[in-house]
């Protein structure tokens, strides 16, 4: 279920380097919610209203070979994830006029989902520190 990311431009910085630079510019914070949100933003997620009309993070990707929009909320689907270690919900929606949901799932820890779907950017153990 890994999400495909955009190919690297020849000669440009690696996705991991871009991610580290974005985090560096945002500065370090101790609040778990703000920290999770900053990491999501640095990975390219944006915040918007989800189909259920709550604030959530979203990003384009592919799922089983189909172009999709991923929506990410806390496990209760009431807003953005509360921390990197809390459960989260991910919905995979068609990226067309129907916007039908293809699949959804809960993950026990947001951090594990991000490591799976952003493996290249988060390849270093220190990415969440």
Image (spheres, rainbow, N blue to C red):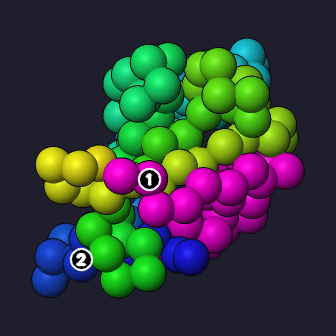
Query: Dot 1: what SS?
Result: strand
Could you tell me if the residues under marks 1 and 2 are in contact, i.e. CB atoms within 8 Å?
A: no
Q: Using the image as rendered, state which of residue 53 and residue 13 is in the foreground.
A: 53
> Looking at the image, which residue is at 75% across and 35% down?
75
> Looking at the image, which residue is at 64% across and 19% down?
78
Label 2 CA crowd tier, 10 Å (few <14, some 14–19, many 20+):
few
In the image, is residue 119 above or below residue 33? below
* Quarter that holds the C terminus: top right
Marks 1 and 2, the one that precedes in the sequence: 2
In the image, is residue 88 above or below residue 70? above
The answer to whether one can see residue 69 in this image is no
In the image, is residue 21 above or below residue 68? above
Which dot marks residue 46?
none
> Looking at the image, which residue is at 59% across and 49% down?
90
Q: Which residues are magenta?
A: 100-128
Q: Position of residue 80 (x, y in %)?
A: 59, 25
> Looking at the image, which residue is at 66% across and 43% down?
89
Query: Dot 2: what SS?
Result: loop
Q: Is 119 contained in the magenta span?
A: yes
Spatial CA distance of label 1 from label 2 is: 29 Å
Q: Nearer the viewer, mark 1 or mark 2?
A: 1
Q: Using the image as rendered, state which of residue 101 and residue 122 is in the foreground.
A: 101
Quarter residue 62 falls in: bottom left
Q: Position of residue 115 (x, y in %)?
A: 65, 64
Which dot marks residue 8?
2
The answer to whether one can see residue 62 in this image is yes
Q: Position of residue 102 (x, y in %)?
A: 46, 62
Write down the residue under mark 1.
101
Does residue 90 appear to the left or right of 59 in the view shown? right
* Quarter that holds the N terminus: bottom right
């Amino acid at each position: 279920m890994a999400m495909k990311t955009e190919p690297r431009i020849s000669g440009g910085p690696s996705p991991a380097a871009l991610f580290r630079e974005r985090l560096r510019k945002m500065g370090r914070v101790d609040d778990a919610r703000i920290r999770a949100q900053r990491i999501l933003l640095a990975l390219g997620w944006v915040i918007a209203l989800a189909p259920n009309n709550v604030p959530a993070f979203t990003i384009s990707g592919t799922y089983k070979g189909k172009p999709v929009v991923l929506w990410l909320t806390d496990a209760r689907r009431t807003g953005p994830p509360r921390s990197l270690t809390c459960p989260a919900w991910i919905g995979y929606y068609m990226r067309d006029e129907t916007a039908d949901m293809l699949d959804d799932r809960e993950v026990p820890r947001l951090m594990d989902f991000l490591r799976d779907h952003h493996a290249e950017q988060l390849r270093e153990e220190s990415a969440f520190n």
